Image (cartoon, grey):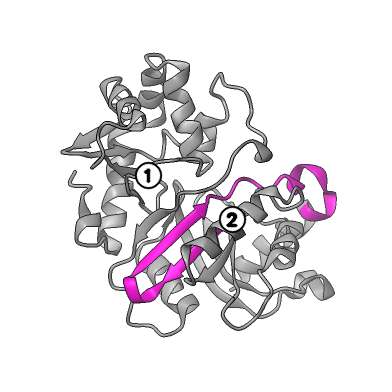
Amino acid sequence: MAFNCFRRGCDAADHLKEFEYCNSNFGIDRVRKALVELSPEHMAVLQRIRLNWLNTKNPVYMFLSGSVVVNCVWGDETLCKHLEAIRSAGAAERAGAAYYLPYTLLSDEVVENLPLPEVAEEEYEIKKFYVVSLRGVAGEADAVEALAKFFEVAPVFLGRRAVKVVRRVPHIMQLANRYTDRIDILLKLADGSLTGVGYVDVTKTYHLGFSMAKSFLLYGLDRVVVLHPYVDQGFHREVANRLKNRWDISEVGYAVVNPMEEELYFYKLPRVNRYLKMSISAQKYSSLIRSYIESL
């Protein structure tokens, strides 16, 4: 597969092709077999990628599936040497200086079961964002509408196919007065899980969307992403680290949309909502939202 579309911009078809390619060539069984050949140092690289904990001068790109491409233009970095070892084990590919790491290798199912110590949020700092090319998204002035339309033609998100895309959910009757913060994009994925995206225009308000994110978690959504328009890298790094260090919403993802450049920047990937294990009400609301989606 030519996974170098980031050089010209990846459109919806590219994202779908990559998703199918990964499923066909890097199934979970192949990835697990390759892990046997990796040292703890190589495994730690996978953990760092999953945590957005990379300190590298090399650009990092991501597909909507969650697969990552590291373009090792600075090939002498230790990171690139680890990536070559991962490729040699059969868990990744290389084209020129670019290393392709399939989403199956970086999935929670794999990374959270690596024989590595758990990393606490305060132990690291987010510095690097992953660039997701969205070629063709620039025609819409409304960032939420543009992203929702892109999901409709490229229905893939972090290792799963989206079976339904709902935009700007006005009200969920089943939640009654519990629905206090609007979900701007609601994805129902093929495994039945729910991902909610909440957009906050930080150029017009001092609110960052943290309380909104907490509401989404308490709604029982499986994954939550806070979305901002692009301001500047320093601002977004600060937001990502503040989000990471908030214990009550630390699993929330953080992304920035830049329609002018036709790009989405992932500063923090979402993790599974732990409230679903802790709260009976969150489990109940999650079931009610699924019923609501089916009624649309």
> From the viewer's perspective, is residue 69 above or below residue 209?
above
In front here: 72 or 90? Answer: 72
Q: Is residue 268 above or below residue 89?
A: below
> Of residues 191 and 133, which is closer to you in this image?
133
Query: Which of the labelled discs sits on residue 240, or is there none?
Result: 2
Where's residue 24, x and y in %?
A: 29, 37
Classify 10 Å Cα crowding around label 1: few (below 14), some (14-19), many (20 and above). many
- Under mark 1, the amino acid is Ser
Query: How far across and down, in percent of the image, does residue 279 sit?
Result: 83, 48
Label 1 element class: loop
- Residue type (three-letter) at the residue carrying disc 2: Ala
Q: Is residue 295 left or right of residue 66?
A: right
From the image, tell me which residue sits under label 1.
67
Assess whether residue 38 is covered by the magenta stretch.
Answer: no
Quarter holding the N terminus?
A: top left
The residue segment tinted magenta is: 254-282
Residue at image x 26%, y 21%? 88
